Image (tube, rainbow, N blue to C red):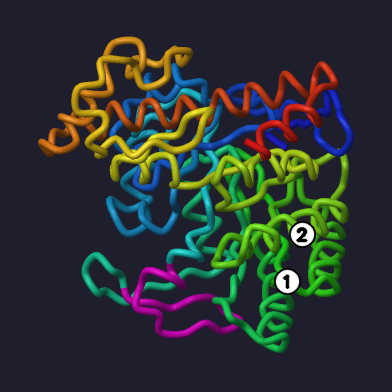
């Protein structure tokens, strides 16, 4: 397993604190992975991401496959060297972007054929090629290719996607030759019996870790929590559990309460670029006129550079002026907020006060 390990260190109810071990360092869980789509967490340097508290980032196979090409990245020493990130990297399979961003040509048992959104060229992702790309990138955790049906989907469509996901997972596992480890992805939509079957079939393939896929694609929050809880209960206790694409702070707290360990989402970085900042008292829209002459820091207790050096009035001015610095400072704060939230959850699970923390957080 190339130095891969996982241990649970503490529990509070179903919530748990753990440690994912990789050849490039440990990941403290529960952990939020900033999204580095094209080999960069938008508007932040790798050192800034590390100072914010992140142990791991996520890279996108689809985008790096199309530009600059995985062969180029491999020749330049792999994704870690290419982007200057020393810690672990998880890469997704590229399938979700091929389904949702590209001009989709065909999905069949072989794989996904599509036309690139970059230049219109005909491309293909198969379980084998997805794993080959991720091996070339040198990721520490590689996600298998799966089929995530677009909502609304009929039971027949979801069942077909579960069948294909299991078949692709087996092929992905057998094809993987990278330096890290592959994770399986459970599908099944909102159908509990299909989720149970998908989890059972993937557990039989004995992956080092498992992801809950097919959520956060348009469902209400209560449906996300319900599906995540069903699936987590059917995954091995001694393997990390990754809830894909879920990023609202309240959803993260609910998911940790259900026993999930790893998370990713573009929400903190995308919202930052749109002028929305996360705080312990809720979201702040920095564009509002009430901040025009506000000399106070964004969040007095936050240790990030944005909060310790700059005023709300200045952040508003930067954003309304279209300054690049606005995106940088807003993103530094939001990524720091998410990392501090995960740190707080790890601490409260560790000292047995997580339930009280979660109740207070969700009620406020």
Labelled disc at residue 226:
2
Residue 218 magenta-highlighted? no
Seen in the image, is 315 located left or right of residue 10? Answer: left
Q: Quadrant of residue 6?
A: top right
**Is the residue marked by circle 1 packed among few (<14), some (14-19), or many (20+) residues within 10 Å?**
many
Image coordinates of residue 109 in percent, x first then y, are 61, 82
Of the two numbered discs 1 and 2 on the same chain, state the one appearing first in sequence.
1
Name the residue rendered at 65%, 28% in the picture: 22
Seen in the image, is 84 located left or right of residue 19? Answer: left
Q: Quadrant of residue 316?
A: top left
Name the residue rendered at 73%, 65% in the picture: 170
Residue numbers of the magenta segment: 98-115
- How far, Cα to Cα, is label 1 from label 2? 9 Å
Q: Is residue 148 above or below residue 355?
A: below
Would residue 276 be visible to someone looking at this image? yes
Residue 113 magenta-highlighted? yes
Name the residue rendered at 58%, 60% in the picture: 216
Residue that mark 1 sits on:
190
Q: Is residue 166 above or below residue 7?
A: below
Image coordinates of residue 344 in percent, x first then y, are 65, 22
């Amino acid at each position: 397993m190339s130095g891969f390990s996982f241990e649970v260190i503490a529990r509070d109810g179903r919530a748990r604190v753990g440690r994912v071990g990789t050849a490039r360092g440990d990941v403290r869980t529960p952990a939020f992975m900033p999204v580095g789509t094209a080999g960069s967490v938008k508007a932040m340097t790798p050192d800034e991401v590390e100072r914010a508290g992140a142990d791991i980032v996520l890279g996108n196979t689809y985008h790096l496959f199309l530009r600059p090409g995985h062969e180029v990245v491999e020749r330049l020493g792999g994704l870690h060297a290419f982007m200057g990130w020393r810690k672990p990297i998880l890469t997704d399979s590229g399938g979700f972007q091929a389904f949702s961003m590209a001009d989709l040509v065909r999905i069949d048992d072989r794989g996904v054929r599509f036309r690139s959104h970059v230049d219109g060229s005909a491309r293909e992702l198969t379980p084998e090629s997805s794993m080959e790309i991720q091996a070339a990138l040198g990721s520490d955790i590689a996600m298998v290719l799966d089929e995530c049906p677009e909502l609304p989907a009929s039971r027949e469509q979801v069942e077909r996607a579960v069948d294909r996901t299991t078949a692709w997972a087996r092929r992905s596992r057998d094809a993987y030759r990278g330096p890290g480890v592959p994770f399986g992805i459970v599908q099944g939509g909102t159908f509990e019996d299909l989720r149970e079957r998908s989890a059972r079939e993937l557990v039989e393939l004995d992956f080092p870790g498992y992801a809950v896929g097919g959520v956060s694609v348009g469902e209400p929050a209560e449906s996300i929590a319900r599906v995540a809880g069903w699936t987590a209960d059917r995954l091995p206790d001694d393997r990390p559990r990754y809830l894909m694409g879920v990023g609202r702070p309240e959803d993260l707290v609910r998911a940790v309460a259900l026993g999930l360990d790893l998370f990713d989402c573009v929400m903190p970085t995308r919202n930052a670029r749109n002028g929305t900042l996360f705080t312990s008292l809720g979201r702040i829209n920095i564009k509002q006129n009430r901040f025009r002459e506000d000399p106070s820091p964004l969040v007095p207790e936050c240790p990030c550079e944005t909060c310790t050096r700059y005023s709300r009035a200045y952040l508003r001015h930067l954003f309304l002026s279209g300054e690049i610095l606005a995106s940088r400072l807003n993103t530094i704060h939001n990524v720091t907020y998410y990392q501090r939230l995960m740190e707080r959850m790890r601490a409260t699970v560790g000292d047995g006060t997580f339930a009280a923390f979660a109740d207070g957080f969700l009620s406020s």
